[in-house]
Image: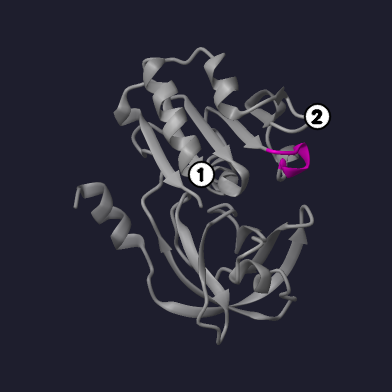
Amino acid sequence: MNNQEKEINQETQTKEITYKVHSIRHLTKSTYVIRFDRNAMKFIPGQHLSVGLANDPQAREYSIYSSQNDDFLEILVKEVDDGIVSKRLKKVKPGDELRVTGPMGFFKLDEHKKATHKHLFIATGTGISPFHSFVKSYLELDYRLIHGVRYSEEAYDSNEYPKSKYTLCASRDSKGNYKGRTTNYLKTQDLDSDTLVYLCGNCDMIFEVYDILTDKGIPTENIHTEVYF
């Protein structure tokens, strides 16, 4: 275990406690944001929680969507056809209780480079969650965000990002900034070799983007990944 991991572990809460739901906000027919109690939880943007209904043994891990500066917690959830937890969470109402464990994880920005380096965030689908927390927590961050989706309606809360910093790649309609896959768009971009790159999404995207980045001269130590299934 390195020093960074020790530092995170010292700030990580692992006890399980119930949290009351404040609201549920539907972004599409299948995707929604749940807001619930924070209870003074300390977390590092990029970490995730295990969330399920109170008195229900089923739970799933979700990256924290809200800012470190908010007095509440939020998660971004996509209802999965063969999923259990996502279907149950979709039915919650204000006042319902959630079972939450965490925060957990090591997908975080480098504190020593946060103010000095450019950051490139690449997400597919709800993999945008940790990046939403990053940019809402660190308001002076120098970043670009590339978000890959199938349809432009899946540009979750895209209005919260400056247009100059956000690129929507929609593979199945032409309403985004780029029609096509994230990987194809990335191939057209020039990148500074000292850019810090963070990837969050399905494993196929991560493997392909990793190769594109290294071919463009990004050192492997500058590439950080979080796999979303």
Position above or below: 59 against 154: below
In the displayed structure, 30 sits above or below 224; it is: below
Instruction: Tell me which label, 2 or 1, sits earlier in the chain.
Output: 2
The answer to if 152 sits in the magenta stretch is yes
Residue drawn at (56%, 46%) of the image: 127
In the displayed structure, 128 sits above or below 55; it is: above
**Which mark is nearer the camera, 2 or 1?**
1
Residue drawn where x is 19% and y is 52% of the image: 1
Splitting the image into 4 quarters, where does residue 55 fall? Answer: bottom right
Q: Amino acid at mark 2?
A: Lys
Q: Amino acid at mark 1?
A: Asn
In percent of width and height, residue 48 lies at: 47, 58
Could one spot residue 201 in this view of the protein?
Answer: yes
Please tell me how crowded label 2 is: few (under 14), some (14-19), or many (20+) other residues with Cα within 10 Å: some
Task: Examine the image and state in which quarter residue 128 appears.
Answer: top right
Q: Which mark is residue 175?
A: 2
Count neighbours of disc 1 (C-alpha within 10 A) and say few if under 14, some if 14 to 19, many if 20 or more. some
Q: Position of residue 79 (x, y in %)?
A: 67, 61
Residue for badge 1: 202
Residue stretch rendered in magenta on the structure: 150-155
Marker disc for residue 157: none
SS class of the residue under badge 1? Answer: loop
On the picture, is 174 further left or further right than 142?
A: right
Is residue 100 rendered to the left or right of residue 147? left
Say whether residue 150 is left or right of residue 145.
right
